[in-house]
């Protein structure tokens, strides 16, 4: 333990930080602090171990078994983003796009389509990996306001050993601010072109031994030009931390989101322009007992529900060549894409130090998902799936130079059976400031219920009378998805060599990661001819373990950060992906090398901020991204693009008003395609933000 933590005051500060944020560490800062406070905070941040996402243990970055990118609150504010998913533009190896103006796409190292599902995202330990349809993370339903985030820890690489299935290619832990930091009130208003009209209100109080924070927010915009993709996203969240005594803490969180979205196309007979709605509610309860340093027992339970509303009626003309009848007939449909998804998750975890130089975390948990989506599963019955898990991670400091991490996760999934995800790594501390890392791990992703059990059969909502026959109501007309029994879990084996230099006297760090990721049994969407229904289809979809990919490359990040408000980060990623696959737009008998183009071969970024005068800051983000394809090798090809974002912000004088005003310009170097040519575009956006605290 560093000697500066030996003083009673430092021990108290460390204990408070640990109690407040465990199992996720979030260090106390103030967003609008003065320069002198920032300097003190910089020293505090530099000395404490600040990474937890790697093994569930608090660790210095030099001790983790993989590369971790930390986006703290100062960086979030300087980035000038309205939406959380945009922050992943700051992380090497990530691809960020928009299917439409209200459907974000975020993936790591490619292998994705319009519904990325190979990365795990958590908010304070609550998984937001959706259990329904195809998508992995529903970014519009995270249930956290961007100003309530303390930091985001992104583990770049597979991590099923610590977090189980779905931590297939990476893990992002979104850590919110402790309520004791947000006493008082805050109002934020943002307006700009494209219909940007956002407002947020936060209130924090202390009632006895309980710290509370209540946040309400609404983000609204018109989406992309020429597309029905407007959105109005609303949320309300509550967090309460109760320090029962010096080593017991009870944390409660609750939240609600409502998203009204424009969807559909103006020239599509079965997918017309319309509005849809998705609501989410959740509750989380966590008890922690910390009897001594490096000792903790925690129990976490959360419950969440998601409800989708998207229903409309249409009469669809079917020509003779499709129906086989002598005349064109109009078939009435009642399209109801509504769903209800309920999740309960319970986990117990213990952190202990059994001997000198040894630290361990042990735990077990269970999760159950219950889905009701009659159209997607061709049944009004609930579709249930469950996961039971047990995990352990051990850190052994064998000598001043060598540190070893080992861990595993055993999961039993009701859909795919039992799987084991092991990991081992060795960190060699060449000097106090330089570390070499060697690691290998196996991760997996279990298929979600839709991939295995989907059965979308459309029936007519009323009888259809023709000259030759009458089609009764409820007759199967066509099938778009059929079940895919026997799907296995995807698996990936990762080999990594890393180098980390932290030159604190120079305020410089350098992180490099050389990796090989061998992905096998990838679940891909395939096509076949279906004879189900009056109108047979040649493109009925199903899923199969037909994909494989070898991903190799290099990620390098260099950062100079003399203060919390001034920094410069330069990063570069080289990726090569090899392996056959089958895109949804091709016949299952015609393999295509689409995986090779599912991520750009080259991408670079620069992100910097400069406090050039007291209370004044300018920040710039510049990205160079190579061409790629989100799915099909041709239909969804996106060319190389550049993106430039600039923000100017000013902290208001405290004697006038405590707050900040900023002007942000996003993507000011021109429109760029983000998913499919001619379908969706990055547009330049300029907006102003006023935030006042009291």
Image (cartoon, grey):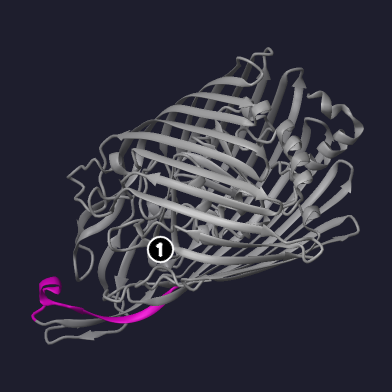
Q: Is residue 439 above or below residue 547?
A: above
Can you say which quadrant of the picture contains the N terminus? top right
Which SS class for mark 1? loop
The reply to whether the magenta stretch includes residue 317 is yes
Number of disc labels: 1
> What x and y, as percent, mark residue 164?
54, 39
Q: Residue at x 66, y 23 (%)?
A: 395
Q: Vertical placement of 567 versus 140: above or below?
A: above
Q: Using the rendered image of the protein, determine whether residue 168 is visible from the camera's viewpoint.
A: no
Which residue is farthest left?
326
Towards the viewer: 442 or 516: 516
Residue, x 72% and y 38% (percent of image)? 42
Is residue 517 covered in magenta?
no
435 to the left or right of 208: left
Q: Residues within 10 Å of mark 1 (few under 14, many from 20)?
A: some
Residue drawn 21% across and 83% down? Answer: 330
What range of the chain is rendered magenta? Answer: 310-326
> Viewer-proximal residue, 652 or 455?
652
User: Looking at the image, which is closer to me, 466 or 360?
Assistant: 360
Position of 654 relative to 231 (above/below) = above
Taking the image as drawn, is residue 606 in sight? yes
Left or right of 145, for residue 378: left
- State the image quarter where residue 466 is shown: bottom left
Q: Position of residue 321 (x, y in %)?
A: 10, 72
Coordinates of residue 58 in the picture (x, y in percent)? 70, 33
Q: Position of residue 518 (x, y in %)?
A: 38, 30
Image-based side of 407 in relation to 599, left or right: right
Q: Quadrant of the C terminus?
A: bottom right
Q: Is residue 125 toward the left or the right of residue 370 in the image?
A: right
Q: Which residue is under mark 1?
A: 683
């Amino acid at each position: 333990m560093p000697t500066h933590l030996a003083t009673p005051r430092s021990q108290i500060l460390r204990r408070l930080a640990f109690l407040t944020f465990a199992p996720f560490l979030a260090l106390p800062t103030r967003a609008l602090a003065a320069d002198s406070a920032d300097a003190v905070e910089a020293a505090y941040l530099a000395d404490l171990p600040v990474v937890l996402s790697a093994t569930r243990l608090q660790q210095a970055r030099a001790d983790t078994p993989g590369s971790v990118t930390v986006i703290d609150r100062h960086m979030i504010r300087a980035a000038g983003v309205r939406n959380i998913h945009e922050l992943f533009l700051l992380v090497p190896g990530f691809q960020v796009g928009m299917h439409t103006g209200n459907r974000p796409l975020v993936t790591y190292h490619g292998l994705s389509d319009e519904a990325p599902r190979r990365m795990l995202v958590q908010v304070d330990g609550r998984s937001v990996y959706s259990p329904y349809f195809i998508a992995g993370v529903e970014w519009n339903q995270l249930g956290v306001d961007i100003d309530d985030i303390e930091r985001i820890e992104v583990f770049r690489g597979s991590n099923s050993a610590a977090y189980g299935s779905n931590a297939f290619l990476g893990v992002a832990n979104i850590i919110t601010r402790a309520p004791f930091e947000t006493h008082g009130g805050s109002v934020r208003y943002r307006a700009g072109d494209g219909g940007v009209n956002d407002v947020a209100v936060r209130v924090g109080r202390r009632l006895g031994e309980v710290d509370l924070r209540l946040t309400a927010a609404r983000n609204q915009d018109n989406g992309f030009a020429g597309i029905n993709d407007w959105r109005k996203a609303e949320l309300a969240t509550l967090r309460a931390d109760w320090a029962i005594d010096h080593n017991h803490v009870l944390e409660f969180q609750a939240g609600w989101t409502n998203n009204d979205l424009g969807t559909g196309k103006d020239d599509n007979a079965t997918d017309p322009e319309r509005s849809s709605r998705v609501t989410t509610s959740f509750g989380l309860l966590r008890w922690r007992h910390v009897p001594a340093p490096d000792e903790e027992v925690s129990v976490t339970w959360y419950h969440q529900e998601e409800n989708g509303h998207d229903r409309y009626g249409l009469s669809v003309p079917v020509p003779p060549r499709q129906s086989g009848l002598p005349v064109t007939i109009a078939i009435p449909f009642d399209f109801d894409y509504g769903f209800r998804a309920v999740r309960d998750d319970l986990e117990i975890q213990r952190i202990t130090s059994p001997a000198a130089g040894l630290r361990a975390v042990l735990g077990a948990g269970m999760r159950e998902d219950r889905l009701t989506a009659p159209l997607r599963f061709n049944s009004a019955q609930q579709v249930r799936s469950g996961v039971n898990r047990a995990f352990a991670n051990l850190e052994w400091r064998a000598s001043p130079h060598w540190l070893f991490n080992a861990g595993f996760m055993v999961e039993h999934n009701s859909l795919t059976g039992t799987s084991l995800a092991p990991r081992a790594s060795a960190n060699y501390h060449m000097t106090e400031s330089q570390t070499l890392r060697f690691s290998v791990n196996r991760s997996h992703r279990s298929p979600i219920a839709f991939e295995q059990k989907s059965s979308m059969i459309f029936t007519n909502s009323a009888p259809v009378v023709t000259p030759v026959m009458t089609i009764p109501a409820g007759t199967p007309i066509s099938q778009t998805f059929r079940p895919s029994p026997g799907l296995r879990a995807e698996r990936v084996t990762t080999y990594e060599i890393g180098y980390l230099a932290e030159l604190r006297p120079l305020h410089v760090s350098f992180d490099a990661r050389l990796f090989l990721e061998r992905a096998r049994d990838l679940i891909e969407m395939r096509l076949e001819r279906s004879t189900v229904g009056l109108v047979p289809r040649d493109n009925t979809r199903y899923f199969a373990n037909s994909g494989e990919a070898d991903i190799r490359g290099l990620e390098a990040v260099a950062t100079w950060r003399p203060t919390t408000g001034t920094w410069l980060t330069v990063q570069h990623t080289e990726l090569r992906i090899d392996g056959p696959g089958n895109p949804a737009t091709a016949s299952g008998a015609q393999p295509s090398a689409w995986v090779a183009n599912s991520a750009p071969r080259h991408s670079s970024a620069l992100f910097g901020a400069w406090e050039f005068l007291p209370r004044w800051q300018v920040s710039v983000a510049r990205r160079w991204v190579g061409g790629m394809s989100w799915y099909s090798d041709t239909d969804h090809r996106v060319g190389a693009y550049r993106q430039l974002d600039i923000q100017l912000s000013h902290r208001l004088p405290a004697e006038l008003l405590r707050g900040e005003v900023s002007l942000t310009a996003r993507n000011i170097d021109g429109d760029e395609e983000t998913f499919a040519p001619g379908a969706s575009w990055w547009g330049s956006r300029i907006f102003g933000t006023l935030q006042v605290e009291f």
